[in-house]
């Protein structure tokens, strides 16, 4: 194996590892958030916005039963907003943000006591 072939093989391996690590990290951030809140009694509903591997939980908001709560997301300067409400149901919106200020929201719900 000559030097060029070894160099190319190293680049291909490095790219594969980079893609594998970043691909596995995206679901891990979302999975950790889901696990945290489902273990606290909430049921996962939906994620709004683009899931990013470098996002961290920055805030959360809950609604009283039947009171609307807003899920907000921002990706590359494109904002999104959705209002959620359902009779007899409380909602939890967990806001995730990246260092570049991209955000997405993870929504959970539970029946009111």
Image: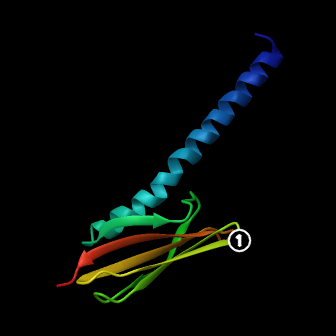
Question: Percent position (x, y) of residue 59?
Answer: 49, 80
**Which residue is rendered at x = 31% and y = 89% of the image?**
64
Nearer the observer, 85 or 24? 85
Q: Quadrant of residue 54?
A: bottom right
Residue sitting at the far top: 1
Q: Quadrant of residue 50?
A: bottom right
Question: Percent position (x, y) of residue 113?
Answer: 17, 85
Q: Is residue 112 left or right of residue 67?
A: left
Question: Percent position (x, y) of residue 4?
Answer: 82, 18
Q: Judge the density around disc 1: few (<14), some (14-19), many (≥20) Cα neighbours within 10 Å.
A: few
**Which residue is rendered at x = 35% and y = 89% of the image?**
67
Q: Quadrant of the N terminus?
A: top right
Q: Give SS at disc 1.
A: loop
Nearer the observer, 45 or 96? 45
- Mark 1 sits on what residue? 77
Question: Percent position (x, y) of residue 5?
Answer: 77, 16
């Amino acid at each position: 194996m000559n030097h060029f072939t070894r160099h190319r093989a190293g680049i291909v391996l490095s790219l594969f590892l980079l893609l594998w690590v970043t691909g596995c990290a995206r679901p891990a951030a979302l999975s950790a958030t889901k696990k945290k809140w489902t273990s606290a009694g909430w049921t996962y509903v939906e994620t709004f916005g683009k899931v990013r591997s470098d996002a961290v939980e920055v805030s959360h908001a809950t609604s009283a039963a039947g009171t609307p709560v807003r899920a907000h997301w921002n990706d590359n300067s494109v904002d999104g907003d959705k209002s959620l409400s359902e009779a007899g149901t409380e909602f939890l919106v967990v806001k995730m943000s990246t260092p570049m200020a991209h955000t997405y929201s993870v929504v959970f719900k539970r029946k009111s006591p």
